[in-house]
Image (tube, rainbow, N blue to C red):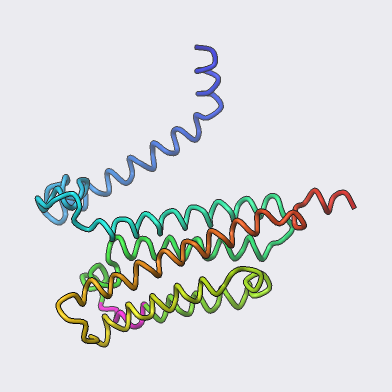
Amino acid sequence: MNELLNQFKSHKLVLFTAFLIAVFFLIATFEYAIYKNIEPANLTRDTATILNGPAYFGALSNLGIILWSATAAIMLFSAVHLYQNTVQRRAALMTLLYGLLTAMLCFDDTYQFHEKAFSGIIYVPEELIYLFYLICIAVISTVCRVVVVTTPFIIGLAAMAFFGMSILIDEVNLPSGKHDAFVEDSFKFIGIVLWTVYHFKSAFGFISDVSWRKENFNKE
């Protein structure tokens, strides 16, 4: 019991903060459902359940979202670790910025911001959103080029190539028969897998490089 009380005293701020964040999102979800005149459960349950479809509907899309989420978490965690434990600020900056960009891509893919969400508020051409993401990647890679060249960037370039093919099929309507949506999503999924592998290897390489650790410099 004493240990439980000590745990509560030590982590009460984190507990209350996490609780308040969760409650905030629940209230916001409920209020939005009332505003849209829909059942709140339609915003809390799984999509397949709401549409009375089998659990495997959207399986690959859901896996892609899991990979987006995992990559963002890895990059953001690595950014904090690198900032606190190494002297290589550009590596920390690269992982932070790419982590934030990946989180943005995850939200976009999950809630279809560039396809549906924006259209209900203000019209934003998809091409403009794609251009924004491309500019973000170019800026991050340029600012952090000193460390980018130490990563297996060929994997990152391959990921972008597959993303580009997916967008091309969608925008130009390249002939791919009745399975055009599958072909488009296949290119995107391969891109997501390569994006995850690239950033995992990059973050792991940064953290594993002992020459950047602060204790090595403190000994000098």
Which one is in front, 80 or 55? 55
Compared to residue 92, the image places residue 25 above or below, namely above
Magenta segment: does it hold 162? no
Please tell me which residue lies in front, 100 or 188: 188
109 lies above or below 39: below
Where, by quadrant of the figure, is residue 154 drawn? Answer: bottom right
Numbered disc total = 0
Q: Which one is in front, 115 or 14? A: 115
Q: Where is residue 215 in the image (x, y as percent from the top left)?
A: 80, 48
Task: Tell me: 176 left or right of 150.
Answer: left
Relative to the observer, which residue lies in front, 205 or 98?
Answer: 205
Residue at the image point whose x is 36% and y is 77% from the top = 129
Is 32 on the left-hand or right-hand side of 147? Answer: left
Percent of width and height locating residue 157? 50, 76
Residue plotted at (38% across, 68% down): 190
Quarter of the image where one finds residue 15: top left
**Magenta stretch bounds:** 123-129
Task: Tell me residue 26's x, y (percent).
Answer: 28, 43
Residue furthest right as drawn: 220
Residue located at (18% from left, 52% from top): 47
In the rendered image, residue 218, in percent from the top left (x then y), is placed at 85, 50
Q: Name the residue located 47 percent from the left edge and 57 percent from the top edge.
A: 72
In reply to whether residue 124 is colored magenta, the answer given is yes
